Amino acid sequence: MKCINKSMIVTILGATASGKTKLSLGLAERYAAEIISADSMQIYKGLDIATAKATPDEMKTAPHHLIDFLDPQCETFTVQDFKRQSLGIIEDLRKRNKMTVIVGGTNYYIESLLWNFTVDSAMEVEKSDANSDENFKFTSETTAVLYEKLRTLDKATAEKLHPNNRRKILTALRHVESGQRSLSEEILDQHASVASDEFSNSLLRGKLRFPNCIGLMIDCKPDVLETRIRNRVEKMISEGLLRELEDFHSKYYEKRREKGFETGIFQVLGFKEFEKYFSLPIEERQTKTGLKFYNEAVELLKQRSVRYSKAQLKWINKRILRHGDPENRLKVFRLDSSDLEHWSENVHQKAVEIVDSFLNGTECPHLPIEELFEEKTDPHKRFVCDICDGKVVIGEICFHEHLKGKAHKAKSRKRKLAAEKETLNALTEKSDNL
């Protein structure tokens, strides 16, 4: 009897947390697999609803790893820590001939596991004692001051960062202050080492870490996705999101305000959106002003959740589906979840057929996603919009999106009207002088 090697890796990608959770639990139950949560927010204790964690009942279906274990005030857990711990778990599962299901919303966490990275500027540098905010001498400075310091110490890196991106600016400054070369020099050197490798188109990634690894991407029509995300926010509110955020806000807001909310679980969608509402005294929250702040927060949470989902899909397209070397490109299969009434056959059953074919070494009845190559653009190019008072935008795609935005168009119209009025006044004045 053939002994099936079940120690394969199944990675679940997509933009909706509920769909990914449902599929991961279904596969884990069928194949006696264990689940690794690759979500940079779910590693923290608390905010279970806001971070869309699997419920205690759901987690009884299969062992879950790297979820709900870190104190919210911890600031030193990095992608390197996640990778180190996850690889230890995967190695143990492979020794026991068990399947690993990786699921989460943080795609660079997933990337760190699947590929042997040489360098990736999207990820943090290796953790050192200097990486703790408490011990870093520049932490008390404003973001504007930090950015100017970085321009002085490492102008090449500064030009690739947005002046308001405090987290990445601090990361680059820590790298310089640790006594190493500038981050830009380090990256250029490692780019060169990759270019000399036989896989020169690997986008700074080495080979796939695991030979028996596939991706399942839960996808749906854009309008369906947006509606689901908006409905999901309403469902989270009905499940107690407001109480959860309020408790978290009262426990941590004052402790955290001086440091800002750009790191750790304090970046989670929902925390900052309700800041104005929770800043009101309790007795004022049911007033006209309170209800106005509440409704604005809910709508802002919906808008940012939709925007975040689109960013996730762009990342998957750009970073995972577009790997340059065919031999080290993850095979990703699309599962269409647009029609939930047919979830079983369109998503679950199709996923089972794909996984079974890899487990049994038979021909897969479904084809992986074709590479969705977009026109090549520079993600680090710096743009300054004079119309929008010198607003800085990093990346060609982001700049084109900015030009199509309502705020930019409104300012363009206002400037055009002002110019036309100025021209008309000049002509009138000239006519009066004749």
Image: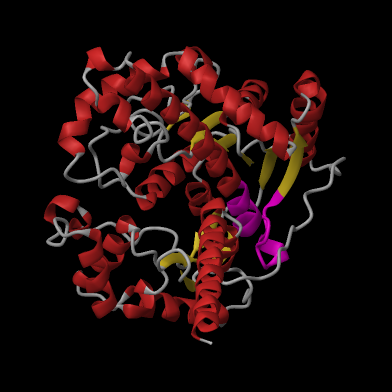
Q: Is residue 306 left or right of residue 38?
A: right
Q: Is residue 21 visible?
A: no
Nearest the eye: 51 or 409: 409
Identify the image quadrant of residue 147: bottom left
The quarter of the rendered structure image containing the C terminus is: bottom right
Question: At which x and y percent is residue 12?
Answer: 62, 38
Nearest the eye: 312 or 58: 312
Q: Considering only vertical position in the picture, is 394 above or below 94?
A: below
Which residue corresponds to the image point at 57% horizontal and 38% vertical from the top-left? 306
Identify the image quadrant of residue 396: bottom right
Q: Is residue 38 magenta?
A: no
Residues in magenta? Answer: 313-331
The quarter of the rendered structure image containing the N terminus is: top right
Question: At which x and y percent is residue 46?
Answer: 33, 24
Nearest the eye: 317 or 260: 260
Q: Is residue 314 magenta?
A: yes
Which residue corresponds to the image point at 82% horizontal and 24% vertical from the top-left? 345
State how many labels appear.
Answer: 0
Q: Is residue 130 left or right of residue 309?
A: left
Nearest the eye: 202 or 235: 235
Question: At which x and y percent is residue 216?
Answer: 69, 40
Q: Considering only vertical position in the picture, is 369 above or below 50?
A: below
Identify the image quadrant of residue 222: top right
Q: Is residue 399 visible?
A: yes
Question: At which x and y percent is residue 163?
Answer: 34, 64
